[in-house]
Image (spheres, rainbow, N blue to C red):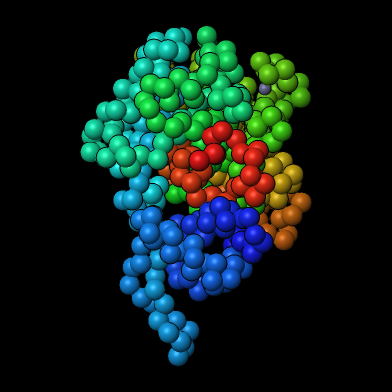
Amino acid sequence: MRQSGTNLPKVGRYNRAVVLDQIQLADGISRVEIAQYTGLTPQTVSGIVRRLIEEGIIREDGESKGAAGGKPRTTLRVNADAGCAVGLHFDPVELSCTVVDLLGRPLVVKKRPARHVTDPAEVVKDMAELVADVLAETGVDRDKVLGIGLATPGPIDLEHGVIVGAPQLTNWTRVPVQHMLSETTGLPVTLDNDATAAAIGERWSGAGRGVADFAYFFFGTGIGGGLILNHQVYRGGSRNAGEFGHSSVLPDGPECYCGNRGCLERLVNPTAIVAEVHRRLAAGSHPDSALARVFAEDPDAVDHAAIRVAAAAGDPVAAAVIDETAEHVASVAVDIANFLDVDLIVLGGHGIQHVESRYVAVVAAALKSRPLSRHIRVVEVEASPLGTDAAVVGSAALVLHATYSPQLSALVGAGVTPGSQR
Ligand SMILES: [Zn+2]
């Protein structure tokens, strides 16, 4: 679970990140413990800690008892108020913005409907206004803002800070959004896709805290995914790893815009779920379904949110459809467990709001009975404690992650993505 530092020369930046990461993950830690967990020499740890204290990023906070008979140890903590990061989540229907402290704790979350979505320049203007509003509301000193993390629907070209054009985003073909937002706000911008951002948020302050290997499912308009492997974000060759939504679960299923057939996302998305519930409600009588009565009055009232609320309350039609969609998710979760041997699967995003526990139950049953490695240990599944705010909190965590997290690429100097360069 712990990460090793290295005592080789020219790795100062990496070691600093390893030490900072330990302090952030622990609820109070001593220099001796950092040395033990990282394998760094006590001198190296002391030097890094001294500089971090001088910079105001960490602080000494009382003393704890050392080993029996040993000297008391000074407890180190992140100085949460020393800086902050702004997170922005651009969803085709909504803009969300937050400011988090250095521990990743949100000070405020603000949302507004996304307007002029087909006009990237207008959207960037709205984003900048929302950032200004949120900073004004929290009264945070602009000098303390480390940067903005921007989470957008994928696919994106991280190398160039460009949105390539998600299916739901007309006119967003190769828009240099990272540069545009940075110009408008005067703040550095870190870009990532929303699912990866949410996974980083989970790693930072959610279910994946301290977990070395986990996969995150993001249920929004579609299904995205993020992978944290060996404590690092795994991005893949074109930096678009984790497209769990395009895993084929029905080989003869409907065609998907991606080129594949029977994709998870094609079967588990708000439109498909609503269509299936409507089909069942229209096809037969369901005397024990409250949703059927609503449907008889006004079919339009049976939307995705209403279905999720009804399923959570045990409505038989809604619950059956949700559980069937969860079965498809479970199949992909089992594949991930088999392929990657992760310890944890996290489910989050507004698309499963109210029905988190149904999804978790179905996926947990599959993970108990189907992966090859289940006799060694059962892969866990959890609903995201960050809930619908995972992506926006995660987008702020992108900035913190770039500040703290030991990027292996820091070891080789160049080759850091623009987003993680600081
Ligand atoms: Zn697909």
Is 356 rendered above or below residue 176? below
Q: Quadrant of residue 76?
A: bottom left
The residue positioned farthest toward the front in the image shown = 10
Closer to us: 172 or 91: 172
How far across and how far down the image is residue 173, in percent?
57, 12
Q: Residue at x 65, y 38 (%)?
A: 415
Total number of numbered labels? 0
Is 313 rendered above or below residue 175? below
- Horizontally, residue 30 falls left or right of residue 267, namely left
How far across and how far down the image is residue 310, in percent?
42, 31
Is 388 rendered above or below residue 230? above
- Horizontally, residue 28 falls left or right of residue 19, namely left
Closer to us: 97 or 275: 97
How far across and how far down the image is residue 35, in percent?
55, 70
The residue positioned farthest toward the bottom in the image shown = 69
How far across and how far down the image is residue 273, in percent?
54, 23
Closer to us: 54 or 112: 54
- Horizontally, residue 232 falls left or right of residue 126, namely right
Quadrant for the N terminus, please. bottom right
Q: Residue at x 43, y 64 (%)?
A: 50
Whether residue 115 appears in this view of the structure is yes
Q: Residue at x 56, y 52 (%)?
A: 13
Closer to us: 56 or 338: 56
Is 88 rendered above or below residue 209? above
Whether residue 198 appears in this view of the structure is no
Q: Residue at x 50, y 53 (%)?
A: 209
Which quarter of the frame holds ligand 1? top right
Q: Quadrant of residue 294?
A: top left
